Amino acid sequence: MSGNVAWKHIGLYANSVGTFTIDAKGIRWKSAMNTDDDDVILTKVLPASTLTGAKWTVFGKSGHLRIQTSGKESELRFDGFPQTDFDKLRKSLADKHNIDVVKHAMASAGASFGLTGLQKRHLVFKQCILDDAFEEGEEFEPRDGDEMLSMNLGDVSQCVVQGNTKHEVELQFHELDTVETGTDQLVGIRFYIPPDPDADPTDKEAQTPAEQLQQTITKVARIKNTAGNAIVEFDENKGTFLTPRGRYTLTLYDTYLRMHGTRYDYHIKYDDISRLFLLPKPDDVHYAFVIALDKPIRQGQQRYQMLVLQTNKQIDQVTVNLDEETLKKEYDNQMDPIMQGSLCNLIAKTFKIISKKKVFVPGKFENAYGKPCVKCALRASEGHLYPLEKSFVFIHKPPVLIRFDEVDSVEFQRYAGGQGSTRNFDLSVKLERQGGESSAKEYVFSGIDRSDFDSLYNFLSGKKNKNN
């Protein structure tokens, strides 16, 4: 067979569809998308010298092809081939690269248990077949059946042991922006790993099989590996995260932030941060440093669009791990090798300079006691509402950011909480209706002290919102 052989509308796993071409130089895939987004793969080239094998599987109406390579990516997966093109595909790879395409059987019995194993960077889940015992009292010998599931551990963002029993492992996957709107994608899966029947139940230090698998996956997936050198680090004792609750070490790199806790480890690109806030708490001791995200982070089924770190204003110091030349060239000498000041300001300043994101602080608003917020409740959770110059921020459960440019109207209402109705009032903030929404979204901040009415009303009257 001479010349190139090509298929259109072929999908590259976790990416868009494009054109799949086999020629004398190897295999090429070119996306049909036209974008400047650096996170989107537009081309993929597999040189002929790296090709080592190929597997064919039919799912539904289309054929799926796995290409094994000796390169960094041990296996790439393509889908969308016509079922009838198996012979054509097999002949093309055999003629041009001496690669035999093997038909790969998949288990379809519907079983939810099996045997796990690692094949390079893939976690493979296979059907468990129990052979009958030949003699009475002999144990059943499990053996591998057909493959049920195979996952590239490079796609894993988190791997944690769940529950007090330490027998469940949860895998969370990166959420992709390249999939079409409305397309389902797998974001998490849990495995139950039975305890070792021969383990000593009194040995509390012994690792369970689930913990051993979790450590193996974490190592292979390289979840905790970081690229580049840390610029600034704030250890977990510098503050407590209220959302998500827990203690995390914050490490700032040149392009991303790392949040490292005992169970979860997050890498957050600065490009995914929409806004930063430094808000003083009414107790005159603590500050809330709020990180608003375009892409929420996840813990299990819970998503967090806003991260709230509670810190303080005690005098502290931080070391900036950059030489003087880099500080001058990259950051215009806005940071010193050793910086001293109140802890909350050190956190805000380093974030502002390294991430190149503005940190918003309270403006002109003051309540009856000279504080930049009012005490209230959102649904059943008490917190504080900060009227800033261009937005409302409520902390902390759940934290809410409302930009003034998305507000349709603000209404002062009689307090609906029963007792104390003459001493309190509610503030209703209604947003503009978005496309596809049947009704406009509304937030009701209830139980605000009546002494704060004048200051809140006068402040909002100076804005463009419709006040009632």
Image (spheres, rainbow, N blue to C red):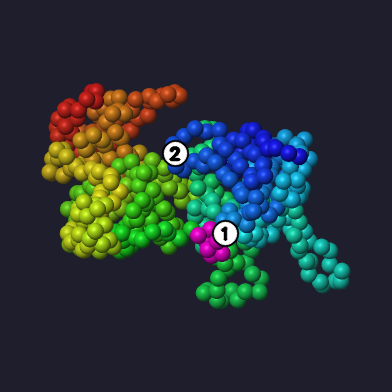
Q: How many marks?
A: 2
| Cα–Cα gap, marks 2 and 1 | 37 Å
Q: Is residue 133 above or below residue 159?
A: below
Q: Nearer the viewer, mark 2 or mark 1?
A: 2
Q: Dot 1 corresponds to which residue?
A: 168
Circle 1 crowding by C-alpha within 10 Å: few under 14, some 14–19, many from 20: many
Q: Dot 2 corresponds to which residue?
A: 37
Q: Amino acid at mark 2?
A: Asp
Give me the residue at 28% from left, 40% from top.
393
323 or 64: which is nearer to us?
A: 323
Identify the residue at the far front of this view.
Answer: 2
Quadrant for the C terminus, please.
top left
Q: Is residue 231 above or below residue 401?
A: below
Q: Is residue 437 above or below residue 35?
A: above
Give me the residue at 36% from left, 53% from top.
257
Image-based side of 432 in relation to 109, left or right:
left
Q: Is residue 217 magenta?
A: yes
- Across and down, in percent, residue 64 comes to 69, 42
Give me the residue at 65% from left, 39% from top.
21
Give me the residue at 35% from left, 47% from top.
270
101 or 310: which is nearer to us?
A: 101
Q: Magenta segment, principal secondary structure? A: helix
- Which region of the structure is painted magenta? 215-222
Q: Is residue 426 visible?
A: no
- Across and down, in percent, residue 85 comes to 75, 37
Looking at marks 2 and 1 on the same chain, the residue that comes earlier in the sequence is marked by 2
Residue 349: image tag:
none
Asked whether disc 2 touches disc 1, contact meaning CB atoms under 8 Å apart, the reply is no
- Across and down, in percent, residue 211 comes to 55, 65
